[in-house]
Amino acid sequence: MTVSVFWQDYLTFGLLQRYLAERLPSWAVIAASAGMFWSGHALLLEHFSPAHPVASLAILALGVVLAALRVRLRTLHVLLALHLSFYFVFVG
């Protein structure tokens, strides 16, 4: 699962967010990255689908926090630590 979290963060907050940052303002980058993070979880993991509103909103909030931290810190290290911590505390 650690590898999965790494790739999620690298693709969403690394590659996608860097690409979007070249073309959009920060607020739009955060919204788009968080939306992509949420949609991946909502579509692939039934527990985070809109049928479970608390879990769905929690993963959206985590996406916003991670995207905002990426814009502010410009590194993935803190994001990986937070995402892995969230996973191991709440899921693992």
Image (spheres, rainbow, N blue to C red):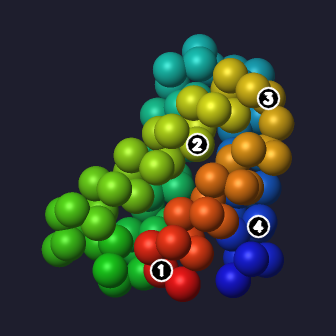
Residue at the spot of label 1:
91
Q: Quadrant of the C terminus?
A: bottom right
Residue at the spot of label 4:
7
The reply to whether discs 1 and 4 touch (Cβ–Cβ < 8 Å) is: no
Who's the residue at 47% across and 80% down the image?
91
Amino acid on which the number 4 mark rests in the picture = Trp
In this view, 8 is above or below 36: below
> Mark 3 vs mark 1: which is more N-terminal?
3
Task: State the residue in front, 52 or 20.
Answer: 52
Residue at the spot of label 2:
66
Q: CA distance from mark 3 to mark 1?
A: 27 Å
Amino acid on which the number 1 mark rests in the picture = Val
Residue at the spot of label 3:
74
The single residue placed furthest to the front in the displayed view is 89
> Which callout, 2 or 1, points to the residue nearer the camera?
1
Residue 60 percent coordinates (x, y): 38, 51
> Which callout, 3 or 1, points to the residue nearer the camera?
1
